[in-house]
Amino acid sequence: MERHVHDKPTQRESLAINYAKAMGIVMVVIGHYHGALFDFYRPYTFHMPLFFFIGGLLLDPRAGTRKFYAGIARKHVLYAISTYLVIGSVAVLFRNGLGVDIQGDPFGGGSILDILRANYRTNFEQNTYFLVLWFIACYAVTSSALFPLIKATHEWKFASGAYVLAILALGYLGMETFAGRFQAGRDIGYNYLSQCCVASAFYLAGYVARPCLWKLLNLYGFIAAFFIMYVSSQAGFDHAVVMAWSKYPDGFLMAFIRICCGIYSTFYLSWVLSSERMDLFEATGKESKAIMSYHLIGYLFLDLAFQALGLYDIRDAAPLDHFHSPVFSPLYIILPTLIPVACAIYCRKAKAGIARRLAPG
């Protein structure tokens, strides 16, 4: 039977998507620590646009509107609030008890409205160990705005062509127009416009790619993507893309091409790997949001352990600056990735156990 464009992903496709998310989140963890483990596929080449692309890839415009927005409220808004409180409280404990300079004040300013204003002015960086809050906010806004538009237009005859034009227009506006205005005047409003335009471009790209992505993945495409990354890097187009702060120093064209090459390469590798089921790698992808949220605070606990060993003074720590050693550095990649996975699995099992006990009969 021929598959419909909006059919749910097959078992292997779902596995490959989780593997792609796992690769992306490991890049986030690496990108927030010292250095990079890759030459051409550096974390800040494409890792944040990848997650918006995956969001579009998984979008089903036939979903009920109420259910969709209830999911946004639960998975993003309520999640952001609860995670902000947890991480902010832990960071304050480290500041007050151990003298750590957390470079922010999660609960300063008095009222809730003051805290919201402070976060708005600083790109959601009052809680410096929850730096990905901008991503959660941007994802919620982007998906909320695009869902009704796609829902209303996805059956149009020339919808795909219109989406492609929108992708290019939004990408240009985000990476050139609004990013340029933000860098020139530091008006935070332009930063948010840039974020949302770039996010929308890759969210739409994921949706447009949905019916053909898996057919387009092949070794020749991967080799082509690799050589584009190599040649562009050798030509000097290898600057970091910092989506959070609207930095695209190589311009729209090269940034867009290199991001697309990175996304393609990630999905090719994830598709190849999906021929074998790796439970831990799959769980890493499924819990990518937890890892994204808690890995920075995980660095602090590792710093505390090395202070106890007499190897580090935790007062030297900062959100993106921690104990660094050629011998122990891998722990800062492995543990902040795996511990949130283990905690999420344990919490899910605990909730299921409580639900069974409370169930009637």
Image (cartoon, grey):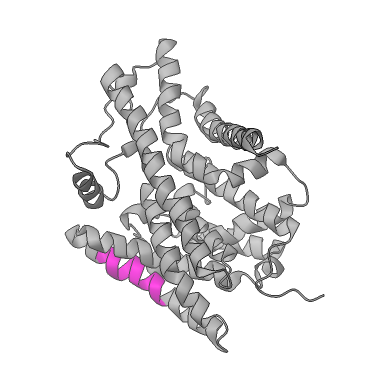
- Image label count: 0
* Quadrant in the picture for the N terminus: bottom right
- Point 65% across, 33% down: residue: 357
Q: Position of residue 114 (x, y in %)?
A: 18, 46
Residue 174 inside the magenta-drawn segment: yes
In this view, the residue farthest toward the right is 1
Give the answer, above or below, for where 215 lies relative to 326.
below
Q: Position of residue 244 (x, y in %)?
A: 35, 53
Depth check, front residue: 89 or 44: 89
Give the answer, above or below, for where 217 lies relative to 33.
below
Give the answer, above or below, for where 12 lies relative to 358.
below
Depth check, front residue: 137 or 73: 73
- Point 69% across, 62% down: residue: 9
* Quadrant in the picture for the C terminus: top right
In this view, the residue farthest toward the front is 361
Q: Main secondary structure of the magenta part?
A: helix
Q: Position of residue 5 (x, y in %)?
A: 67, 74
> Is 83 left, or right, of 188 in this rendering?
right
> Is 284 left, or right, of 322 in this rendering?
right
Depth check, front residue: 193 or 151: 151
Query: Visible in this render: residue 143?
Result: yes
- Point 38% across, 58% down: residue: 138
Give the answer, above or below, for where 51 lies relative to 295.
below
Hey, which quadrant is residue 227 in on the image? Answer: bottom right
Query: Visible in this render: residue 132?
Result: no
Q: Position of residue 28 (x, y in %)?
A: 48, 44
> Is 10 left, or right, of 170 in this rendering?
right
**In the rendered structure, which segment of residues is drawn in magenta?**
169-180
- Point 68% across, 56% down: residue: 14
Residue 119 inside the magenta-drawn segment: no
Hey, which quadrant is residue 237 in on the image? Answer: bottom left
